[in-house]
Amino acid sequence: MAPLVETFHPARLQQHIQYQADGKVRKPPVDLRQCALKELIQYECDLRGPLNDPKSKVVCDPVLKLFRKCANGLTVETTSWEDIHDR
């Protein structure tokens, strides 16, 4: 099982990424708006129909994920953050 991860409001992302996993402050500070915007499409799939019915189908819907890739190698998922800020 993966370790627990702190949850926070997307509006706090800019402040949250200023700290590394070990709690140390990032130097220099990161400005997400200056990082390149990248997109990734994932798929969420569900079985439509009974499990053992050969007529059942797997239906997949695209889910757009947005990321910011910064010059220092930091990559941050910003899907919810982008909804708050202008792209």
Image (spheres, rainbow, N blue to C red):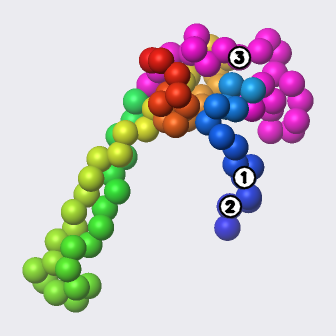
For label 3, the residue is 30
Image quadrant holding the C terminus, namely top left
Q: Which amino acid type is shown beneath numbered disc 3? A: Val
Q: Residue furthest left?
A: 55
- What kind of residue is marked 1? Val
Tag on residue 5? 1
21 with respect to 83 (left or right):
right
**Picture residue at 43% right of the left edge, 38% below the top:** 65
Identify the residue position indicated by label 2 in the image: 2
User: Pointer 3 and pointer 1: residues touching (CB < 8 Å)?
Assistant: no
Nearer to us: label 2 or label 3? 3
**Residue 33 on the magenta span:** yes
Q: Nearer the viewer, residue 27 or 73?
A: 27
Q: Foreground: 17 or 74?
A: 17
Question: How far apart are the two marked residues, 3 and 1, measured between alpha carbons?
Answer: 21 Å
Q: Assign a secondary structure to mark 3.
A: loop
